[in-house]
Amino acid sequence: MPEISLADMVAAYRSAKVDLYYASESRLVDIVEYEEDLVSRLENLLERINGKDEAWVFDADFVGTYTFAPKTVTLQPSASSDAFFWSDSGSAWQAAAMAEQRPQAEFRVMSLCGIDMHVLSTLWMQTSGGKMEAALGHEAMGSRLRRTPSGRLNTHSPGSFQQYYSPYARWRDRGLKAMTETLNSGISVVALTADISSFYHKLNPEFLLNVAFLRDVLGVNLTRQERKINRLFVNALDAWMTFAANEGGWPARGLPVGLPASAVVANLALVELDRLAMEEFKPIYYGRYVDDVIIVLRAGSSFSSQREVWKWLIQRSRGLISEIVPNGINSSDVSIRFAPSYLDSSEVIFANNKNKTFHLSGASGLALVGSIQKTIDERASEWRSFTPVRADPADVGTDLAVATRSDGEDAATLRDADQVSTRRSAFAIRLRDFEAYERDLDLESWIDQRTAFFNAICANVLVLPKFFELASYLPRVLGLAAACGDFVALTKLLSSLARVYDDVLLDCELTVKAYAEDGAAEDDVAARWAAQLVRQSVESIASALTRVNARELAGAMDPLMSVAKAASVSLPGVREIHRLHARLFARDMAYVPYRFALLNREIAPQRGLPNSRVREARVPWDLPLDNEVRDGLNQLADSLRVAQVDTVVGLGTDLAGSEVAGLVFATRPPNVWELFLALRSPGGQEFGFASAQIVHRILAAVRGYSSRQELPHVTLSENGHPTISVVGAAHGGKVRFALAMVETSMSSLTGAALGTPDLNRSRYESFKRIFNEAVARPRRADYLVLPELALPSKWFVPFAIKLQRDGVSLIAGIEYLTAGRRTVHNEVWAALRSAGRHGVGYVVYPQDKQRPAPAEEQWLYNLGRLRLVPKVRWRHPVPPVIAHGDFRFAMLICSELTNIEYRAALRGRVDALVVPEWNKDLHTFQALVESAALAQIFLRADVPA
């Protein structure tokens, strides 16, 4: 068996970097420092992996350390249930803190493993672990590795795991669907939900070395090299576990939470539970999301209590499940143990307080399931919808206070109890909307709303006990304030954070989940937590702050000094933060993705790009890369150069012949719609449409995309008439269009033509209202059409993405795009939904106006001697036909409809003609429309000037 190669190590690092970047402890500085010396570090690790000595996995530098992350604050029952309420969060906390019993601040142990250990763990997932994970059934839905449609591990994809939401929704929704269908057939059901207590913290990974487990349970046969990787990985987990126990003074057990590979280990530990459920329980439905289980059974006559249901399952469990009755046989505090032989040194217990059983029958059962499904649909709709941000700053604070309240929420699953997930979801929606504001709008147009939002966060989030529920959002909040250059907000946020830290130490008893629940070594917890807060704050600010004002930044960081002192660390200076931002950006770990510096300025937000030249972060040209990856990256570099991208930060115009860290090791690589817009050029395929072959080669390299057949392509008929084919769902002969009437003012039009587009808040919200109405109607349209010159180019993709989630394809006239040398483009863009065997996506097709209308030509000249020229001039005077599934249509822009040659070429070849217009006279083309409609279906989006 060949040894592990440097190419294998590079592939492992590419995935490990993305996994760690998106982890709750992203470790930005650690990744940068590792990557800046990447080759020597990977070669050193490779030499140890292939060597005979295996004791190095026990080295402290390799294992790393751990920190503490906030989990929850538990108040004395009288303090949390008293009928006396405080509107001021500070007064409410003081009242709770003065209770006879001190509040308990519970922390969770989070690993800070060495980056070498992350690389080894990812290598394990790509070899031994991936081979084992393939033995899991479809009923295990959480933390599954990315695979190609053929089942092969997808090592080219960004990150090791499938995205979180789709598997979670599948786990939840399939259970509800099974209940509904069974109840509708007149059969009563029992639904049992169960959650393993402190699963990661009580699991011993040594079962992965059990030969009987590998052979008899998983049915896998590891090669000699795979066995070695597996042994090194398990010993590394054991080394971390031992180190943490020695440092913390608790029993040596548990997986390193925060190490992505731990999720695969946890999944494998429960493979026998999955098979037991499917083979012996014969459920109507069984699904597991890591350690959360849903079982739906036919309601037997003996199912009169939760304990009876568990007894029924125990009888059929082949001795693998048993009861734990700690206080006598009649105790109600009964827990359930799952104990297969391979987990004899672990503790897998379904605690009684987390288990729930529902007996559902008839109309009442359907009503309960229906109410849960309704809540899910409403929340999904809220995530997809174009929720408005209140114009009145006072209402911004009210909305956030309501979103984070603790009372009155509906359950979204049968398992919901404390509704923490509800509050997190509600807060995340509000935060997402303000992040969109920062990305899409002029900063001055929403300064009042921004100030109110940050003030509301200080009053409702950065307070106890609420902060412990929402602490994971702290980096995003600080990053948003830094990206806006809002030093006043940063000062308030960091002051509130320091006050939370002080209040916890002053008023709370500190505990550690699963390890020191009766009280922890408070000095150690406080110091490690303080270090975590400082690290998160500094990295979040440095990643987003491009406009560094030394005095203002120093003042904003000042409140963090006390926390840094408690952690025995020093805060970086202003110059150091500025340099760190440049280093993060070059490695694609800054707030703004590195790709935005490469893409056309009309589609990528430019705020947040470094003001000064960033030193190019090169990767050695001889670094071994997979041939498909190298080919795709070279294609991306060549294509961007052809597309005349001349604003690449620190790279000049020639990317070919170099390997740039921000591309090779991208955390957020280009996606399909960006590529189709960025690679469109006069030298490209017919009509400038990007070649599907080129796009596929790039996507295969940076995203592991596997299906070229589902990308659009251009074909020419014998007469040279072009057709752009996009794989889409069949419409069955019925296509519904929505025509939106949008006001485009002369000031907005003039600003766009002169290169200063109008990106203000009120205009943005007006588009959101239009789009919200389009998706809220019961009979939703297949296509939403906006007039000519209606939409700023930077807003097209964000809006199109949200419309796509509701199955709506957006066709919009784009504001004038400046092209230098006193030239502008007038284009219409179509975001077309693509539905194939491997899921739903979409592509963007841009089309140029070939020549201006006479009045438009004169207006542009008078404005600034501007000329309208197409970015891509048609080689033949024939408009392209778009075959979107079984629906064929074409697009013309306003005065192009008067060109009889265009209409003649399209006659008999399309089902519809879409013509976005911007006209003073609504009846200019009335007769022409009527005559054209005799030959084809006609759609006209018009708006008065």
Image: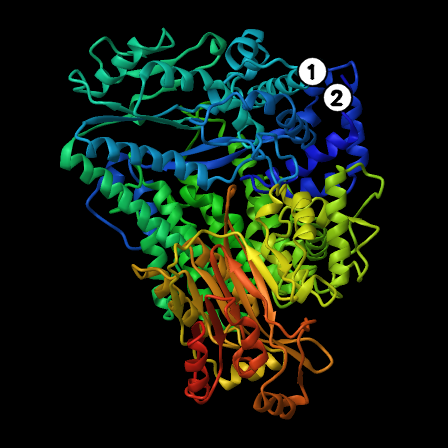
Q: Is residue 566 left or right of residue 54?
A: left
Q: Give residue 940's position: percent from left, percent from top.
A: 44, 76
Q: Give residue 537's position: percent from left, percent from top.
A: 57, 49
Tell me the amino acid under the disc marked 2.
Answer: Ile
Q: Give residue 535's position: percent from left, percent from top.
A: 60, 44
Q: Give residue 498's position: percent from left, percent from top.
A: 50, 48
Tell me the amino acid under the disc marked 1.
Answer: Lys
Q: Is residue 301 left or right of residue 471?
A: left
Q: Is residue 809 left or right of residue 182?
A: right
The dot on residue 228 is: 1
Q: Is residue 335 left or right of residue 428?
A: left
Along the line of sight, which residue is nearer the eye, 561 or 342?
342
Along the line of sight, which residue is nearer the eye, 771 or 726?
726
Query: Marks 2 and 1, how far apart in space?
Result: 9 Å
Q: Quadrant of residue 19?
A: top right
- Asked if marks 2 and 1 touch (Cβ < 8 Å), the reply is yes
The dot on residue 49 is: 2
- Element at badge 2? helix
User: Which is nearer the N-term, disc 2 or disc 1?
Assistant: 2
**Residue 90 in sight from this viewpoint:** no
Q: Quadrant of residue 278?
A: top left
The residue drawn where x is 40% and y is 51% is: 427
